[in-house]
Image: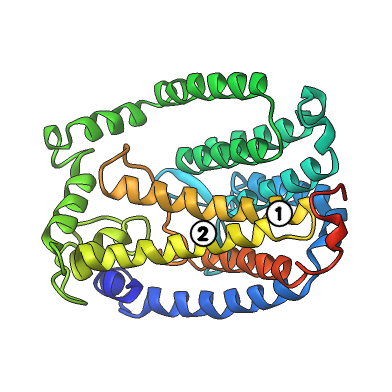
């Protein structure tokens, strides 16, 4: 699908129709290496690195703002570049946030209802979200906030803190939208994209054309028309639109069923983990995959305002693919250790 969605734009932009395909193949190879390595490193030995992981993630998120290191595209500074290679630190930060929450909540489960206990999580989550929104990248910021909320809920968040956190989130979203004029334009385009068919509404309209053209069984593999420079980011954030055009409703349902199967298998691993830390970690990784998938599908189908968020494992982008495959490897590690220390199930680390 990456090749089908990208060969034309790759040929126009780089003079090589295999540009994105080659990068994705490299991402698959490195991702498989990350998966294997993470499946063999005992996840419990990673606990002592929780603050180091946070510190490194903050440094990486800050590097995107440094000229010569950070790479700017379409007015956003979200990438770090070394020669021809780039990666997005926020992809790593999402999973570091899950890792930190899993460690902290498992070590302080009896005190999870205390605000003082939750303060380090709010601090780390707040720093991550602030640095990401400054890039600016509201979609990943919302994704991180939702994941943080899920981790706190799984970790035993009290009803009072649940209400306060929900209220703060409800107030923050409109404030972030008002703070940037282009976000208000995106809201307007979402409500009525045909009011600005050549402006803010263009991408959503082209996405809907792609999905609508696919019908029940699709136009056939490689037969999409929207990828010929009609639909922006067809190979990345809007690849699901091209999939809908080429493999149709039935094919899209099959893809979403595969995501659902993966999610429930990861939840199964979480439920059978030999300790609370492993359970929270696997559940958090499953949540990242589910939240990001749902956000992507909602955007391309016009269910929420347009924003940039890749479809896990499928959208072009080797750094995202490597990180997600490494996270799955960590879940396999938790699964391999499920029969050890059964007496520690849901106990403190």
Which residue is labeled 1 in the image? 279
- Within 10 Å of disc 1 (Cα), the crowding (few <14, some 14-19, many 20+) is many
Does any portion of residue 228 appear in the rendered image?
Answer: no
* Snapshot colouring: rainbow
Q: Which mark is residue 263?
A: 2
Give the SS element for disc 1: helix
Of the pair 10 and 2, the residue shown nearer to us: 2
Q: Is residue 308 left or right of residue 53?
A: left
Q: Which mark is residue 123?
A: none
Residue 119 lies in quadrant:
top right
Query: Which percent across, then down, holds residue 77?
Result: 51, 46
Which of the two discs, 1 and 2, labels the residue nearer the N terminus?
2
Residue 20 lies in quadrant:
bottom left
**Residue displayed at 52% across by 69% down:** 84
Q: What's the CA distance linking mark 1 and mark 2? A: 14 Å
**Residue displayed at 25% across by 43% down:** 302
Does any portion of residue 270 appear in the rendered image?
Answer: yes
The quadrant of the picture occupied by the N terminus is: bottom left
Query: Which percent across, then down, holds residue 7?
Result: 28, 75
């Amino acid at each position: 699908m990456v090749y089908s969605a990208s060969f034309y734009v790759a040929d126009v932009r780089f003079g090589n129709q295999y540009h994105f395909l080659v990068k994705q193949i490299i991402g698959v190879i490195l991702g498989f290496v990350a998966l294997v390595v993470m499946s063999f490193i005992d996840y419990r030995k990673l606990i002592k690195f929780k603050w180091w992981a946070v510190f490194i993630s903050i440094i990486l998120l800050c590097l995107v703002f440094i000229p010569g290191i950070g790479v700017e595209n379409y007015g956003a500074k979200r990438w770090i570049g070394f020669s021809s290679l780039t990666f997005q630190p926020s992809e790593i930060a999402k999973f570091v946030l899950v890792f930190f929450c899993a460690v902290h909540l498992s070590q302080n489960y009896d005190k999870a209802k205390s605000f003082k206990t939750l303060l380090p999580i709010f601090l780390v989550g707040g720093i991550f979200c602030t640095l990401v929104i400054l890039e600016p990248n509201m979609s990943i910021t919302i994704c991180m906030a939702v994941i943080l909320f899920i981790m706190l809920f799984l970790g035993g968040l009290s009803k009072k803190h649940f209400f306060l956190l929900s209220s703060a989130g409800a107030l923050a979203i409109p404030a972030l939208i008002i703070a940037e004029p282009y976000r208000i334009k995106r809201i307007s385009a979402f409500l009525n994209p045909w009011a600005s068919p050549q402006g803010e509404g263009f991408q959503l309209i082209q996405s809907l054309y792609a999905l609508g053209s696919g019908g029940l069984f699709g136009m056939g593999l490689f037969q999409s028309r929207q990828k010929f420079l009609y639909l922006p980011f067809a190979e990345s954030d809007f690849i699901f639109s091209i999939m809908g055009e080429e493999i149709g409703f039935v094919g899209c349902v099959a893809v979403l069923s595969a995501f659902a199967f993966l999610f429930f298998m990861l939840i199964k691993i979480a439920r059978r983990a030999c300790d609370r830390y492993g359970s929270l970690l696997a559940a958090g990784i499953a949540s990242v995959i589910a939240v990001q998938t749902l956000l992507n599908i909602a955007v391309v189908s016009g269910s929420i305002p347009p924003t940039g968020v890749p479809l896990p494992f499928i959208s072009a982008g080797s750094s995202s693919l490597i990180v997600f495959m490494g996270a799955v490897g960590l879940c396999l590690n938790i699964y391999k250790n499920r029969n050890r220390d059964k007496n520690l199930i849901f106990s403190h680390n």
